[in-house]
């Protein structure tokens, strides 16, 4: 770059010398032909004008003006071949020459600069239009990179390259490079991690490597790729080319962002469609299973009533009833899941007595496990809470069912309700003395379809829906739900319900 500037400066100096020398030669001829002195002045002014035309910047025009005046004084004013002046009127001539030369030089330089800027902007606009018009037809990220390096290589007359990053922000194994005017090639990246770390911690606009100058292509959220310009081409780039390169990188980043956004929308639509099909299938199966399950439960219960408990057929009918009841509970959870996913869960809040809601849940569990005892602790006075009783009953049944499954027959199971006056909420707690919840599973138990590897909550004979539905129902009421292990063993699930009805719920 420094060598090129020196060569350019040398060329302009020679241009100044040439035009002044040519003007001097012409003036010698004019003097031999006895032309008026004013013609000589005009010739020197013309030399200054031509110097401004064929050089860049004001400095050469001003230098040509000074040299032209000194040369005119030295060769064509008395006393000759000195810089002295006998006739004071020549100072007026020199002043007029200086002002005229500087003005014409400045005007010429300004016009030339404006013309140059106009051509640069026209070339920039044309190149950007060409790039963006081709990018609209790109099929993927690699195609965008290929179009970009082809355009940049043509403009900079180099073999540009581009390395794309994937959706996770990692560089790809290969980068695309322009091999010739019609062919591109792929080259392996030596060390992706070093390159990624270098770009993420870059403090300047680019990184100058052994072979390439690397410019990161920034998207809305992360680095989308790296534009690689060979060192020779990068070092000889002008300011106008550098501006054009940055504009092209911005256009490339927009195209990559737009493509990724389109891909995300497509994937999102596919996921929504799959989720809708799954929900419809679950809903249809659940509705079809409801009726026969109710029939199986009723028939098995009737057989139990008609059979002596010591008869082997009683145990068989009891097992049928329990399995059918479990399936019925699973079907209800699946239907609740589909309603939640379709946003069709409508709350019918009424002021309900806590004692009655808990009684219904305990009775439901009593039918499934009549041998289990559940301790209930509620306030002595009647406690009314705004809730959808049917849905809260489903929450309590799911929590109690988990407690029964994971607590030994002699283990304690309890339901406790207290009033938190500070937060104006009713606090429900279902506790047991079972095996508790593994620490690794504690933060995931409310996730949909999550089942623990150990014998923790909601993992036996389940698909991981019960606790997820409990969380959705409680949150729909404006409350919170949490799980923790108890001292001495066992698990404890706590959920809260606001005591005051929100205005938008009235």
Image (tube, grey):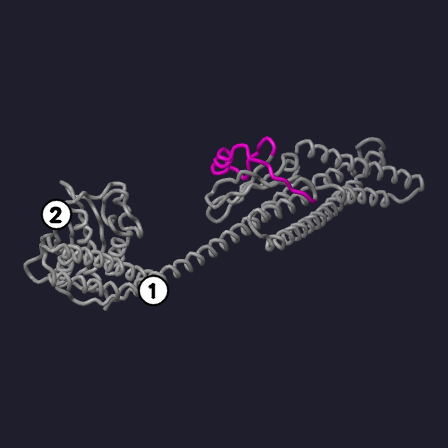
Q: Position of residue 198 (x, y in %)?
A: 50, 35
User: In which quadrant of the rendered image does the N terminus lie?
Assistant: top right
The segment highlighted magenta reads 182-211
Name which residue lies at 18% across and 51% down.
Answer: 494
Q: Is residue 418 above or below residue 15?
A: below
Q: Quadrant of residue 484?
A: top left
Q: Is residue 431 above or below residue 283?
A: above
Q: Which residue is mark 1?
A: 284
Q: Nearer the viewer, residue 377 or 209?
A: 377
Q: Quadrant of residue 473?
A: bottom left
Determine whether the residue tagged by mark 2 lies in a helix, strand or loop. Answer: loop
**Considering only order in the chain, which callout, 1 or 2, is on the residue closer to the N terminus?**
1
Asked whether residue 159 is in view, the answer is yes
Q: Is residue 206 magenta?
A: yes
The alpha-carbon separation of the residues under discs 2 and 1 comes to: 37 Å
User: Are there few (<14), some (14-19), or many (20+) residues within 10 Å of tag 1?
Assistant: few
Q: Which residue is mark 2?
A: 409
């Amino acid at each position: 770059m420094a060598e090129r500037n020196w060569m350019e400066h040398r060329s302009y100096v020679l241009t100044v010398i040439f035009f002044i020398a040519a003007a001097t030669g012409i003036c010698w001829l004019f003097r031999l032909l006895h032309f008026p002195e004013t013609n000589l002045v005009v010739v020197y002014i013309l030399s200054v004008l031509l110097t401004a035309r064929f050089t860049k910047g004001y400095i050469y025009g001003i230098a040509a003006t000074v040299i032209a005046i000194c040369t005119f004084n030295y060769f064509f004013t008395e006393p000759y071949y000195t810089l002295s002046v006998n006739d004071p009127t020549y100072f007026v001539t020199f002043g007029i020459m200086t002002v005229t030369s500087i003005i014409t030089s400045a005007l010429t330089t300004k016009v030339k600069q404006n013309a140059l800027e106009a051509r640069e902007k026209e070339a920039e606009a044309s190149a950007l239009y060409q790039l963006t018009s081709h990018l609209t037809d790109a099929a993927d990220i690699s195609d965008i990179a290929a179009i970009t390096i082809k355009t940049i290589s043509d403009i900079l007359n180099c073999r540009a390259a581009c390395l794309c990053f994937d959706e996770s922000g990692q560089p790809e194994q290969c980068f695309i490079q322009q091999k010739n005017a019609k062919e591109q090639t792929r080259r392996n990246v030596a060390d992706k991690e070093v390159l990624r770390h270098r770009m993420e911690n870059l403090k300047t606009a680019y990184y100058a490597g052994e072979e390439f100058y690397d410019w990161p292509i920034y998207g809305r959220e992360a680095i989308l790729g790296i534009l690689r310009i060979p060192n020779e081409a990068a070092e000889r780039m002008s300011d106008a080319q550098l501006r054009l390169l940055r504009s092209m990188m911005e256009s490339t980043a927009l195209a990559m962002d737009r493509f990724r956004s389109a891909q995300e929308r497509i994937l999102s639509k596919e996921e929504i469609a799959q989720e809708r099909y799954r929900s419809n299938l679950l809903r249809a199966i659940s509705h079809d299973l409801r009726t026969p399950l109710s029939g199986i439960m009723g028939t098995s219960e009737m057989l139990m009533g008609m059979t002596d408990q010591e008869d082997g057929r009683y145990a068989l009918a009891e097992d049928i009833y329990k399995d059918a009841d479990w399936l019925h509970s699973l079907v209800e959870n699946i239907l609740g899941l589909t309603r939640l996913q379709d946003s069709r869960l409508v709350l019918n809040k009424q002021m309900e007595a806590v004692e009655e809601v808990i009684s219904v849940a305990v009775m439901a569990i009593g039918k499934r496990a009549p041998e289990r005892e559940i301790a209930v602790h509620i306030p002595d006075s009647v406690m009314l809470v705004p809730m959808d009783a049917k849905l809260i009953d489903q929450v309590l049944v799911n929590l109690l069912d988990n407690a029964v499954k994971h607590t030994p027959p002699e283990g304690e199971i309890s339901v406790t309700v207290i009033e938190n006056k500070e937060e104006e909420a009713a606090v429900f707690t279902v506790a047991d003395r079972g095996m508790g919840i593994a620490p690794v599973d504690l933060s995931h138990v409310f996730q949909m379809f999550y089942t623990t590897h150990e014998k923790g909550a909601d993992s036996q004979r389940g698909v991981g829906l019960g606790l997820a539905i409990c969380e959705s129902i409680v949150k729909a009421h404006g409350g919170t739900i949490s799980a923790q292990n108890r001292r001495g063993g066992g698990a404890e699930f706590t959920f809260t319900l606001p005591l005051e009805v929100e205005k938008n719920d009235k």
